[in-house]
Image (cartoon, helix red, strand yellow):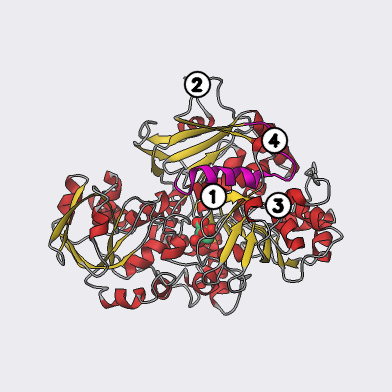
Amino acid sequence: MAKNVAQKLIASHLVEGGMRSGEEIGLKIDQTLTQDATGTLVMLEFEALGIPRVRTELSAQYVDHNLFQEDFKNPDDHLFLRSACKKFGLWYSRPGNGVSHPVHMERFGVPGKTLLGSDSHTCAAGSLGMLAIGAGGLEVAMAMAGEPFHIKMPKIWGVKLVGELPDWVSAKDVILEMLRRHDVDGGIGKIIEYYGPGLMALSAMDRHVIANMGAELGATATVFPSDEAVKEFLKSQGRGDAWREILADENAAYDEHAEINLSELEPLIALPSSPGNVVPVREVAGREIYQSYIGSSANPGLRDFAIAAFIVDGKQVHDRVSFDVNPTSRQILENMIELGILGKLIRAGARLHQAGCGGCIGMGQAPATGRISLRTVPRNFPGRSGTKEDRVYLCSPETAAASALAGVITDPRMLDMAYPRFKEPETNRLNTGMLVPPASEGAPYELEKGPNIKPLPTLEPLPDQLEGPVLLKVADDISTDGIMPAGAKALPLRSNIPELSKFAFSQIDETYYARAMGCQKRGSFIVGGANYGQGSSREHAALGLRYLGLKAVLAKSFARIHLQNLSNFGILPLTFVDPEDCKKIAQGDVLSIPDVRNAIRKGNRVRVINLTKNETYETEHPMTPRQVEMALAGSLINLVRQKRLNLSRNN
Ligand code: MIC
């Protein structure tokens, strides 16, 4: 039977289940990616699994998020990660080497392989014809241990690209168009596969831009074929040998279809505070800006910096504008220097930051109060920039650079110049010095745990009955940034759950932590809307809340990765059979779920009693039998430990 690219990638890694949409499948994972903000927990979890060394073909640990060293915490974490890489056999990308996604693509990405990463933008590697999926840290730790990764077989959504991008319109506008059409939940349960003649003019890095922000659509993954563009990219990275062709078979079918005529696109922009809030730039042109920011995994390529440089070349950015340039990798920085791109940016007023995630994750570069920040980053969830009630807009480097000059949002087509074209060099200046290879097997390495590394909290098995107050009721599309914020203050605590948990829901309700601590032992509930937990892969948004006593979340629907994270840490995800019931529950109502262990063992239905209002609601849990076992055990780690204990007893 004719197969599309996604089906080929799945079929070649399928170790459990059948490829029928909705059925749980197990996939062999070839490579893993971890970054520092999630990687510390991953290493603690891997340690808890008791496996001496990673069992993947390649695992790489990047330090790209927590680069500020305000005190001992971040550097402690860096050294801990370095020691974990030595002990467990991972590559270590040193602080300042760059953002995981472009570096992984440059150095390690291989068409046809699977990649699982503890970062939601891991999907960017789909640009090389890989099956690359973002997941919670515990899933990644399991993959490092050689275990298959489980998901429900996604639908394959074929998006045909026809035509050619007009001048001043680039890859970012393609993914913004997808978000304009389908919003932040349009990709849930789907792998997006791009195909068609429009691909011809899109370089591998352009495809990275599109694949990266598949995460913003809620998609499981995004895949592109591995064709000439991928071959050219790998050759330019000195890795031509890694290339192999992977194309969809002729007549391959897709579960769902869409088509984009690239020739009809225009510069687009996402308004505050959702990546799905997209309009043409011309509709908001003229609004005064404070910041113009270029960089991040959403626009990481040399091309993105080059185009911005050509636009501002010989001019000065507006004197109100902070023009922030965040090179995405040390290698890209070196090539920017080599080609004279950096000089043009600096002379025009750019503020240069070290290679890494920086302001994209709120690690510095926060905008001024009430002012507009234009960013080429993937996300603009409320407060993520570090400034409360921020006004972050997402756009292409073309729009960001044109607006930096004018000091107001500017449609780049209005610039009085020819569209600058940039041809990627056939060979790049390679920079691999800050990538440390895995240490040889058998050498005795100790984990270096400074005072910022705290043990994982103990998680009790699910009791027979759950009872407690609804501590918070939140709206649709609440992101993990809303649940457990990132930013310069919280991120250094990612390896210290008791301290990190103080930030839970702090952007929405500053009293949450104190109220949760007040009923930590008894337990509590949260009521959410649709697409609860969209955005990042951070499992801290589950584990931190579990530490505070959260027992279950009742919502209209859940985002994929967060749903997995909740189950991994023994928090019940429940959806309303009648969504209208959601309205009946008020914050403060006391809920009870009697005989909950039996209920989730027997089937999908779970009856929730509102003791305050004397009402009963029918809910369903979307957990697979495997996830039910985790919930019963109290967490995936407990389950693995239990199984191991049973095994050793039986032997
Ligand atoms: C993000 O862009 O939100 C992050 C920071 O990269 C997260 C990971 C994290 O929270 O550490 C992600 O995308 O998964």
Query: Gap in Å between the C-alphas at discs 2 and 3?
Result: 43 Å
Magenta run includes residue 167 = yes
Residue 122: image tag: 1
The location of residue 468, given as percent across then percent down, is: 21, 68
Q: Amino acid at mark 1?
A: Thr
Labels 1 and 3 touching (C-beta < 8 A)? no
Labels 2 and 3 touching (C-beta < 8 A)? no
Q: Residue at x 48, y 78 (%)?
A: 451
Q: Is residue 348 left or right of residue 532?
A: right
What segment is highlighted magenta in the picture?
A: 162-185
User: Mark 1 falls on what kind of element?
Assistant: helix
Query: Gap in Å between the C-alphas at discs 1 and 2?
Result: 27 Å
Residue for badge 2: 2
The answer to which quarter of the image holds residue 511 is bottom left
Q: Is residue 342 left or right of residue 353?
A: right
Q: Amino acid at mark 3?
A: Asp
The location of residue 180, given as percent across then percent down, is: 54, 46
Nearer-N-terminus badge (1/2): 2
Residue 229: image tag: 4
